[in-house]
Each structure stands twice: as structure tokens, then as C-alpha cells.
Image: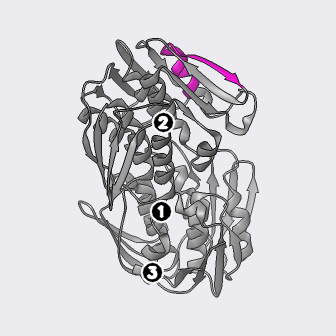
Amino acid sequence: MSVLRIAGGSRLNGSVRVHGAKNSVLPILAATLVGSGESVIRNCPEIADVEAAFNILRHIGCTARRDGGEVVVGAADVTGCEIPHSLMREMRSSVIFLGAILGRCGKAVISSPGGCELGPRPVDMHLAALRELGADVSEESGNIICRCGRLRGAKITLRLPSVGATENTMLAACFADGTTVISNAAREPENSDLQSFLRELGVSVYGAGTSTVTVEGNRVKTGAEHRVIPDRIAAATYACAAAATAGDIEITDAEPRHLASVLSALRGMGCAVSVSHDRIRIAAPEGLSSLPPISTEPYPGFPTDAQAQLMAVSLKAQGTTSFIENIFQSRYAHALEMRRFGANIKIEGKVALVTGVAKLAGAPVTAPDLRGGAALVIAGLSAEGITEVSEPSHIDRGYECIESSLREIGADIERI
């Protein structure tokens, strides 16, 4: 079993490139099923979740091959409609394939999250939307089974602006007869990127990036070429690493507009932040200030996927910062691990209160999840002594060899 071993105390300096967005490429890979030929996806990150998506595509009869950052997916022969539990476990967001497989095959089968009875859980919004498009949804032997004859366009209002439910509905609607209007849609940049790819496939879809998305049904092209947008959460992670270590770095191949809320928070802590077309410069002082309450919200609010990383920055900031997690329940597992460094964190429900301390001490910690793991790496970089982060496979789901990227900007980190 590997660990990330970090010798803390180095100030980060230099330039680091941002890879393609994990949260864009996964629905785009699912969207290749809308076409019936080969699609070329560029700036595709080499991360574990992409490999899991390839395994799903190959399992249902597609081809998928990679040449560096370019991927070619062939969707001419889709021979299966079921994602087995073994593949569902590889990638938390495997449900994103549900709408595309259903529309393409007339049936889709996935394992139920947790193998329990259908009830209040994130996939409920996905399933409710598919029902409104004409799908029959049932549960049998721990699997969710969706069937349809012809899907039909519908007016769908999401209970919450869920990114995944918006994307799944968009993909299923590509196969529907008539027009689908999705209200209270998520506004994240990744949804707009999916829209761009679907348009390149010939689908008439518009409104992504706003709260109303409209899709005119029926696919019309065999394949398309597309370049994935930069990963805003990876960029936020490197920016937070620079802030936590009093560093001075440039982040390249980024999209600063997608990071407005994170960059605003770092400015509020005392960092000098400058942006250009595709670059972000972060220069941090020795001492950081605490912030007004940070409340995670749907885009363009502060992203839940950057909450843990900013918390790592706040561990040594002067004063107290409160974090309010509104998107996910139980997203403070990283905070419990941060206490091993000597951090002062109190948790009450969805609120975490972080009071800065003068020093952090390196410690053995365990990555509880993708973003929490990245946050523990940041904390280790800012601590004195040696930190070992176990379970780095969680981090590998969303970052291309994070230790190599951090070494490029001066971090003393290795995988052992």
C-alpha cells in the first residue's frame, strides 16, 4: 500500500499546469453514447475516474483508447446496458451513464447506491427526471432498472440544482421525441462544457450555465471532437497550497472566471492574486487572516469541492473561520484528520469552526475521500516535520500524479 510522504516547511514557488476537468470529462465520456461513431476528446486527464469510465464504456461494447491527453471513443456498437456493481464501485459518479445508456438502448441497469431500498438519496432526482421523460423505474435484487419505449420531451423542474441530475437529464433528452426544458438546472461550467460537446454532436441544446436548459431531442451525428475545459478544482487546490505555504506560484492553462469565489476568499486572507487570460498568480504572505463565514453553495457560490482545501489554508490563519457545508452531509471527515496536525477545529452539524494555531506538526493521516485527501496534503505541506498520507488512491481519482505537480513548484513530496 502506497503513501504520500511530505516533508513540510517548503515555500511553493514556480509554475504548475492544470489538467482537464474531471467533472467535465466524465459526463462528456457518457455523452459519446449520443453519437454512433468515433469521438475525439482532448485535454482528457489521466486520472483514476477516467480509467473507470473507460471500463464502463468497454463493458457495454464501446472502444476507448488513449494517446497522451487525447482519447478516442468508438460508440458504433453498444451491446450492453448494464453497469455491474464491480464497475459502479470504481467510480462514485457512475450514475452519470444512466441517462445516455437508457436513451441509446431503451434499458439501463445499475446497482443501487448502498444496495438499500430506494429512498431519499442523491439519485432520486435523476430517477424522477427520467420518469418524467417516460422511463419506467424499478428496483430488483439491489439494482435500479430503467426501461423505456420512446422517451418523450417534458418540462422538468429539479428539486435542487444538482449537477449530475442536470447532466443525466440532458443526456437522456437527446434521445427523446420533442423538446425538454429543465428548470432549476445547475449552472456549473462543467454543464456548459457538456452542452458544447453535445452541440458538436449536432444536438440542439442551449441555456447551460443558466437555470433553464432546453434540449431538442434526437441525435444527428456520428461523432465529434472536443477539448475539455480546465479543472477549476485542481487549480483551486494548487492555489490553496501556495497560500498555506506562503508561496508564490503561477497556475497555467486555467480558467480564472470559474474560480472567482475561491480567489476572492484567498484575497480576503491576504494573498495577492492576479489573473490573465489563462493564468493565475498567487503570492501569499507569512501570516494569513481569517475569513467571514464560508458557505458552500451551487455555482457561482463557493464550491463544496474546494471547502476542504480552503480549510487547510485556514488552519494557521489568525482568528476563527466558520465553514457551513450546505451541499453534502458528512463532508468533514478531513477535519477529524486535520486535528492530528494540532489543528483547532470544532464541528457542530453542518458547521465547522477553525481557529488558527501558530504551528502544525506533521502526522500520519488517512485520506477519507478525493478532496479531503488533497486538503490533507496541503496541511502536510504547511506543517513542520514529516506527514504521511495513506490511501492516496482517493486523491488519484481527480488529480494527475499530484506529487509530481507539487514537486514542480518546490514541494518535498514523494509516493512510497
Give the mark, 2 or 1, whose residue is nearer the N terminus. Answer: 2
Callout 1 environment at 10 Å: few (<14), some (14 to 19), or many (20+)? many
Residue drawn at the location 32% of the way across and 35% of the way down: 195
> Mark 1 to mark 3: distance in Å?
14 Å
Callout 2 environment at 10 Å: few (<14), some (14 to 19), or many (20+)? some
Residue 326 visible, this orientation: no
Residue matched to label 1:
399
* Magenta-tinted stretch: 126-140
Q: Secondary structure at mark 1?
A: loop
Residue matched to label 3:
407
What amino acid type should be assigned to the residue bearing mark 1? Answer: Tyr
Residue 47 is situated, as x and y percent measured from the top left of the image, at 47, 59
State the count of labels.
3
**Which of pointers 2 and 3 indicates the residue nearer the eye?**
2
Residue 74 visible, this orientation: yes
Q: Quadrant of the C terminus?
A: bottom right
Indicate which disc residue 60 carries.
2
What amino acid type should be assigned to the residue bearing mark 2? Answer: Ile
Residue 329 is situated, as x and y percent measured from the top left of the image, at 68, 45
Picture quadrant of residue 277: bottom left
Residue 192 is situated, as x and y percent measured from the top left of the image, at 34, 39
Callout 3 environment at 10 Å: few (<14), some (14 to 19), or many (20+)? some
> Mark 2 to mark 1: distance in Å?
26 Å
Residue drawn at the location 36% of the way across and 64% of the way down: 18
Q: Quadrant of the N terminus?
A: bottom right
